[in-house]
Amino acid sequence: METATLLKPKKKDKKYKRVVLSRSAGGTVLIFAFLTLVGAFMVLPLVYVLVTAFKPLNEILTYPPKFFVQHPTLSNFRDLIEITQETWVPFERSLFNSLMLAILGTFAYIIIASLAAYPLAKNRSKWVYVYYQVVVLAILFRPEVTRTPLYIIISRLGLINTYWSLLLPVLAGSFGVFLMRQFMMTIPDEMLEAARIDGANEFTIFWKFIMPSVKPAWMTLTIFTFKDLWNTGESQYIYEETLKTLTAVMQSISSAGIARAGAGAVVALIMMIPPVVVFIISQSSVIETMATSGIKG
């Protein structure tokens, strides 16, 4: 038994062509079963974090550890609430810092990266290629390499103990520029020329034509940027407790010893939820991005 699909006819053809694939139905079932197993294996860590948050302390410390919870409890959540109430800085303040940083930082980075990528993709200046190569080379540098010079720059600008010290390094990232530029290269120049002939300026073209056309790219960039900003923990630029993010506070709680292992499990669950939700909302755009990015160099 063989599977088949219909292809859209060419302009000169008036009928659909029936193309028979060489893969049998059995092969399709095997591939589906294999992908199901791989997907289940990849989701196991998420499930383990979820069930561990409901384990009592004795089950968390059991060796060898058991995957599923035997006696579910909410005591870990109560312990975390009590711990956060005893801290100097309210839990709501740390949550606000993380949400503000993740949401505003993600929005700002998408705009900045898109504005920087537009001329790199559509400008025909002889220096554009040089600028693009600088962007590509900047991706190769690990954060550990730039940590010292970045600290000097932030310090000289007087941004220590400010939100800007957490935002500016992210806004200066080059990966988003590279990704947006690759997608913008696939947009036909004829469409932009037609818009210019109709009287549209560059700003209108950017907002009305470019950004809607590269929606999969900036949705994907939203996932990566939000994840990085949300997971911002202990920072070398922040020393005031009122400016620390939720991740930094949660890390200090979960690293306080065995007695807080249950609260640490709840911390892992809380920190996992927002990135997972953002990914679920944008997963279709991620698949489209991985399938079409990198077509043009």
Image (cartoon, helix red, strand yellow):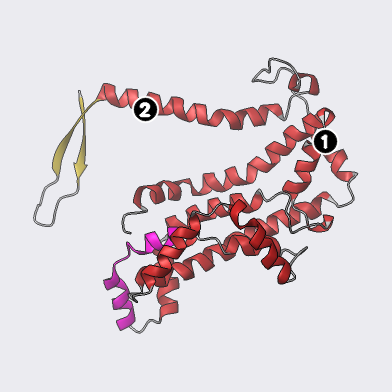
- Residue 82 appears left or right of 266: right
Q: Tell me: residue 52, above or below residue 89.
A: above
Q: Does dot 2 land on a helix, a strand or a loop?
A: helix
Residue corresponding to mark 1: 256
- Residue 136 appears left or right of 97: left
- Residue type at mark 2 is Phe
Residue corresponding to mark 2: 32
Quarter placement of the C terminus: bottom left
Q: Can residue 104 be seen at all in this image of the molecule?
A: no
Q: Position of residue 265 (x, y in %)?
A: 73, 32
Q: Residue at x 54, y 51 (%)?
A: 224
Of tags 2 and 1, which is closer to the observer?
1
- Residue type at mark 1 is Ala
Q: Residue at x 66, y 58 (%)?
A: 148
The quadrant holding residue 103 is bottom right
Q: Position of residue 221 (x, y in %)?
A: 50, 55
Q: Residue at x 80, y 23 (%)?
A: 57
Please report whichever mark, 2 or 1, sits nearer to the chain's N-terminal start: 2
Q: Position of residue 291 (x, y in %)?
A: 36, 47
Count neighbours of disc 1 (C-alpha within 10 A) and say few if under 14, some if 14 to 19, many if 20 or more.
few
The quadrant holding residue 154 is bottom right
Quarter placement of the N terminus: top left
Residue at the top extreme? 64
Q: Can residue 119 be seen at all in this image of the molecule?
A: yes
Count neighbours of disc 2 (C-alpha within 10 A) and say few if under 14, some if 14 to 19, many if 20 or more.
few
Image: magenta residue range: 178-197
Q: Residue at x 87, y 39 (%)?
A: 82
* Rendered image: mark on residue 272: none
Secondary structure mostly seen in magenta is helix
Q: Quick one: 24 or 146, which is closer to the camera?
A: 146
The quadrant holding residue 171 is bottom right
Q: Does dot 1 land on a helix, a strand or a loop?
A: loop
